[in-house]
Amino acid sequence: MNELVILSLARESMIVALKISAPALAAALIVGLVLSMLQAITQISEMTLTFVPKLLGMLAVMLLTGPFVGGELVDFGRRTFAMLAEYRDIADAARF
């Protein structure tokens, strides 16, 4: 494999990783900010208070975005295997 193919695959895999992780991370960020403001207003300084709401928020977002995440992963897998098959065909043709 040449460097361009490897860099292209690495770049695309990083983009897919960002796409599939962004909704859950955004949910955790928003829930964390809301709970932090609530704790600041009420002056409750309990560190374990934020764990369960963040977990529930992330779970709800993951359930809602499950089809999107699955579709992205399937599309990425198909593109990757198609690219590898194409590269293999080119490499086989170059041998003859």
Image (spheres, helix red, strand yellow):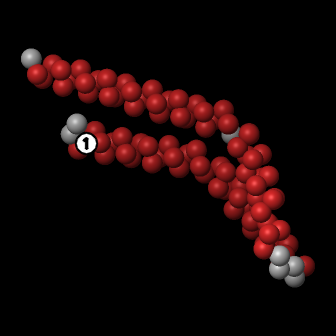
Instruction: Classify the position of the N terminus by image quarter.
Output: top left
Q: Is residue 93 left or right of residue 50?
A: left
The spot of residue 11 in percent (x, y) is 39, 46
Marker count (numbered): 1
Is 49 drawn above or below residue 2 in the view shown? below
Q: Residue furthest left?
A: 96
User: Which residue does the image show at 87% across and 82% down from the upper left?
Assistant: 43
Q: Residue furthest front?
A: 48
The answer to whether one can see residue 66 in this image is yes
Residue for badge 1: 4
Instruction: Classify the position of the C terminus by image quarter.
Output: top left
Rendered image quadrant of residue 87: top left
The answer to whether one can see residue 41 in this image is no
User: Which residue does the image show at 55% across and 35% down from the upper left?
Assistant: 72
Q: Residue furthest bottom?
A: 43
The spot of residue 10 in percent (x, y) is 37, 45
Is 39 drawn above or below residue 93 in the view shown? below
Q: Residue furthest right?
A: 42
The spot of residue 76 in percent (x, y) is 47, 33
Q: Residues within 10 Å of mark 1 (few under 14, many from 20)?
A: few
Q: Is residue 45 left or right of residue 10?
A: right
User: Which residue does the image show at 32% across and 28% down from the upper left?
Assistant: 84
Is 10 drawn above or below residue 86 in the view shown? below
The spot of residue 92 in percent (x, y) is 18, 20
Rendered image quadrant of residue 47: bottom right
| Amino acid tagged 1 | Leu
Secondary element type, mark 1: helix
User: Which residue does the image show at 24% across and 20% down from the upper left?
Assistant: 89
Q: Is residue 94 left or right of residue 57?
A: left
Rendered image quadrant of residue 13: top left
Q: Is residue 3 left or right of residue 23?
A: left
